Image: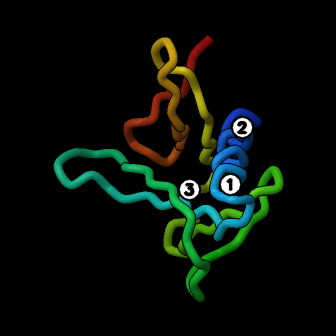
């Protein structure tokens, strides 16, 4: 199962609130880059299909296609400040060949 940081959950909840408080579950998808190793990550609100698994994480309904469960296992989604006032979601996925484990 994937994890959401508190910052990511707060940002997703803010987006749900800005859309009127009601939304479809959040779909998390992963595709492989065509020209090099590594994954591309996508998120958006969507309807649940028969081939999806539904999870509630930090009060947010998240759907993942069953074919992606193995490559998203252990993944963490965070929401961070990149530069100045620029913020974005980042995906820490130990199954991604380009992921580097942070060293302290």
Residue 70: in sight, yes or no? no
Reading the image, the residue beneath label 2 is: 5
> Which of marks 3 and 1 precedes in the sequence?
1
The residue lying toward the viewer, choosing from 89 and 67, is 89
Q: Position of residue 56 (x, y in %)?
A: 78, 62
24 relative to 92, above or below = below
Mark 2 lies on a secondary structure that is: loop
Residue 89: in sight, yes or no? yes
**Closer mark to the observer between disc 2 and disc 1:** 1
The structure residue drawn at horizontal position 56% and vertical position 56%, both measured from the top left corner, is 72
Mark 3 lies on a secondary structure that is: helix
The structure residue drawn at horizontal position 60% and vertical position 47%, both measured from the top left corner, is 75
Q: Quadrant of the N terminus?
A: bottom right
Q: CA distance from mark 2 to mark 3?
A: 15 Å
Disc number at residue 16?
1
Disc number at residue 72?
3
Q: Position of residue 98 (x, y in %)?
A: 38, 37
The residue lying toward the viewer, choosing from 76 and 9, is 9
Question: Is 33 left or right of 20, judged from the image as shown?
Answer: left
């Amino acid at each position: 199962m994937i994890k959401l940081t508190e910052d990511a959950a707060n940002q997703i909840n803010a987006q749900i609130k800005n859309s009127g408080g009601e939304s479809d579950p959040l779909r998390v998808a992963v595709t492989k880059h065509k020209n090099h190793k590594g994954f591309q990550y996508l998120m958006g609100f969507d309807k649940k299909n028969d081939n999806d698994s539904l999870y509630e994480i930090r009060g947010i309904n998240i759907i993942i296609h069953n074919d992606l469960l193995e490559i998203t296992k252990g993944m963490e989604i965070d929401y961070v400040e990149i530069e100045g006032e620029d913020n974005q979601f980042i995906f820490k996925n130990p199954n991604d060949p380009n992921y580097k484990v942070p060293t302290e």
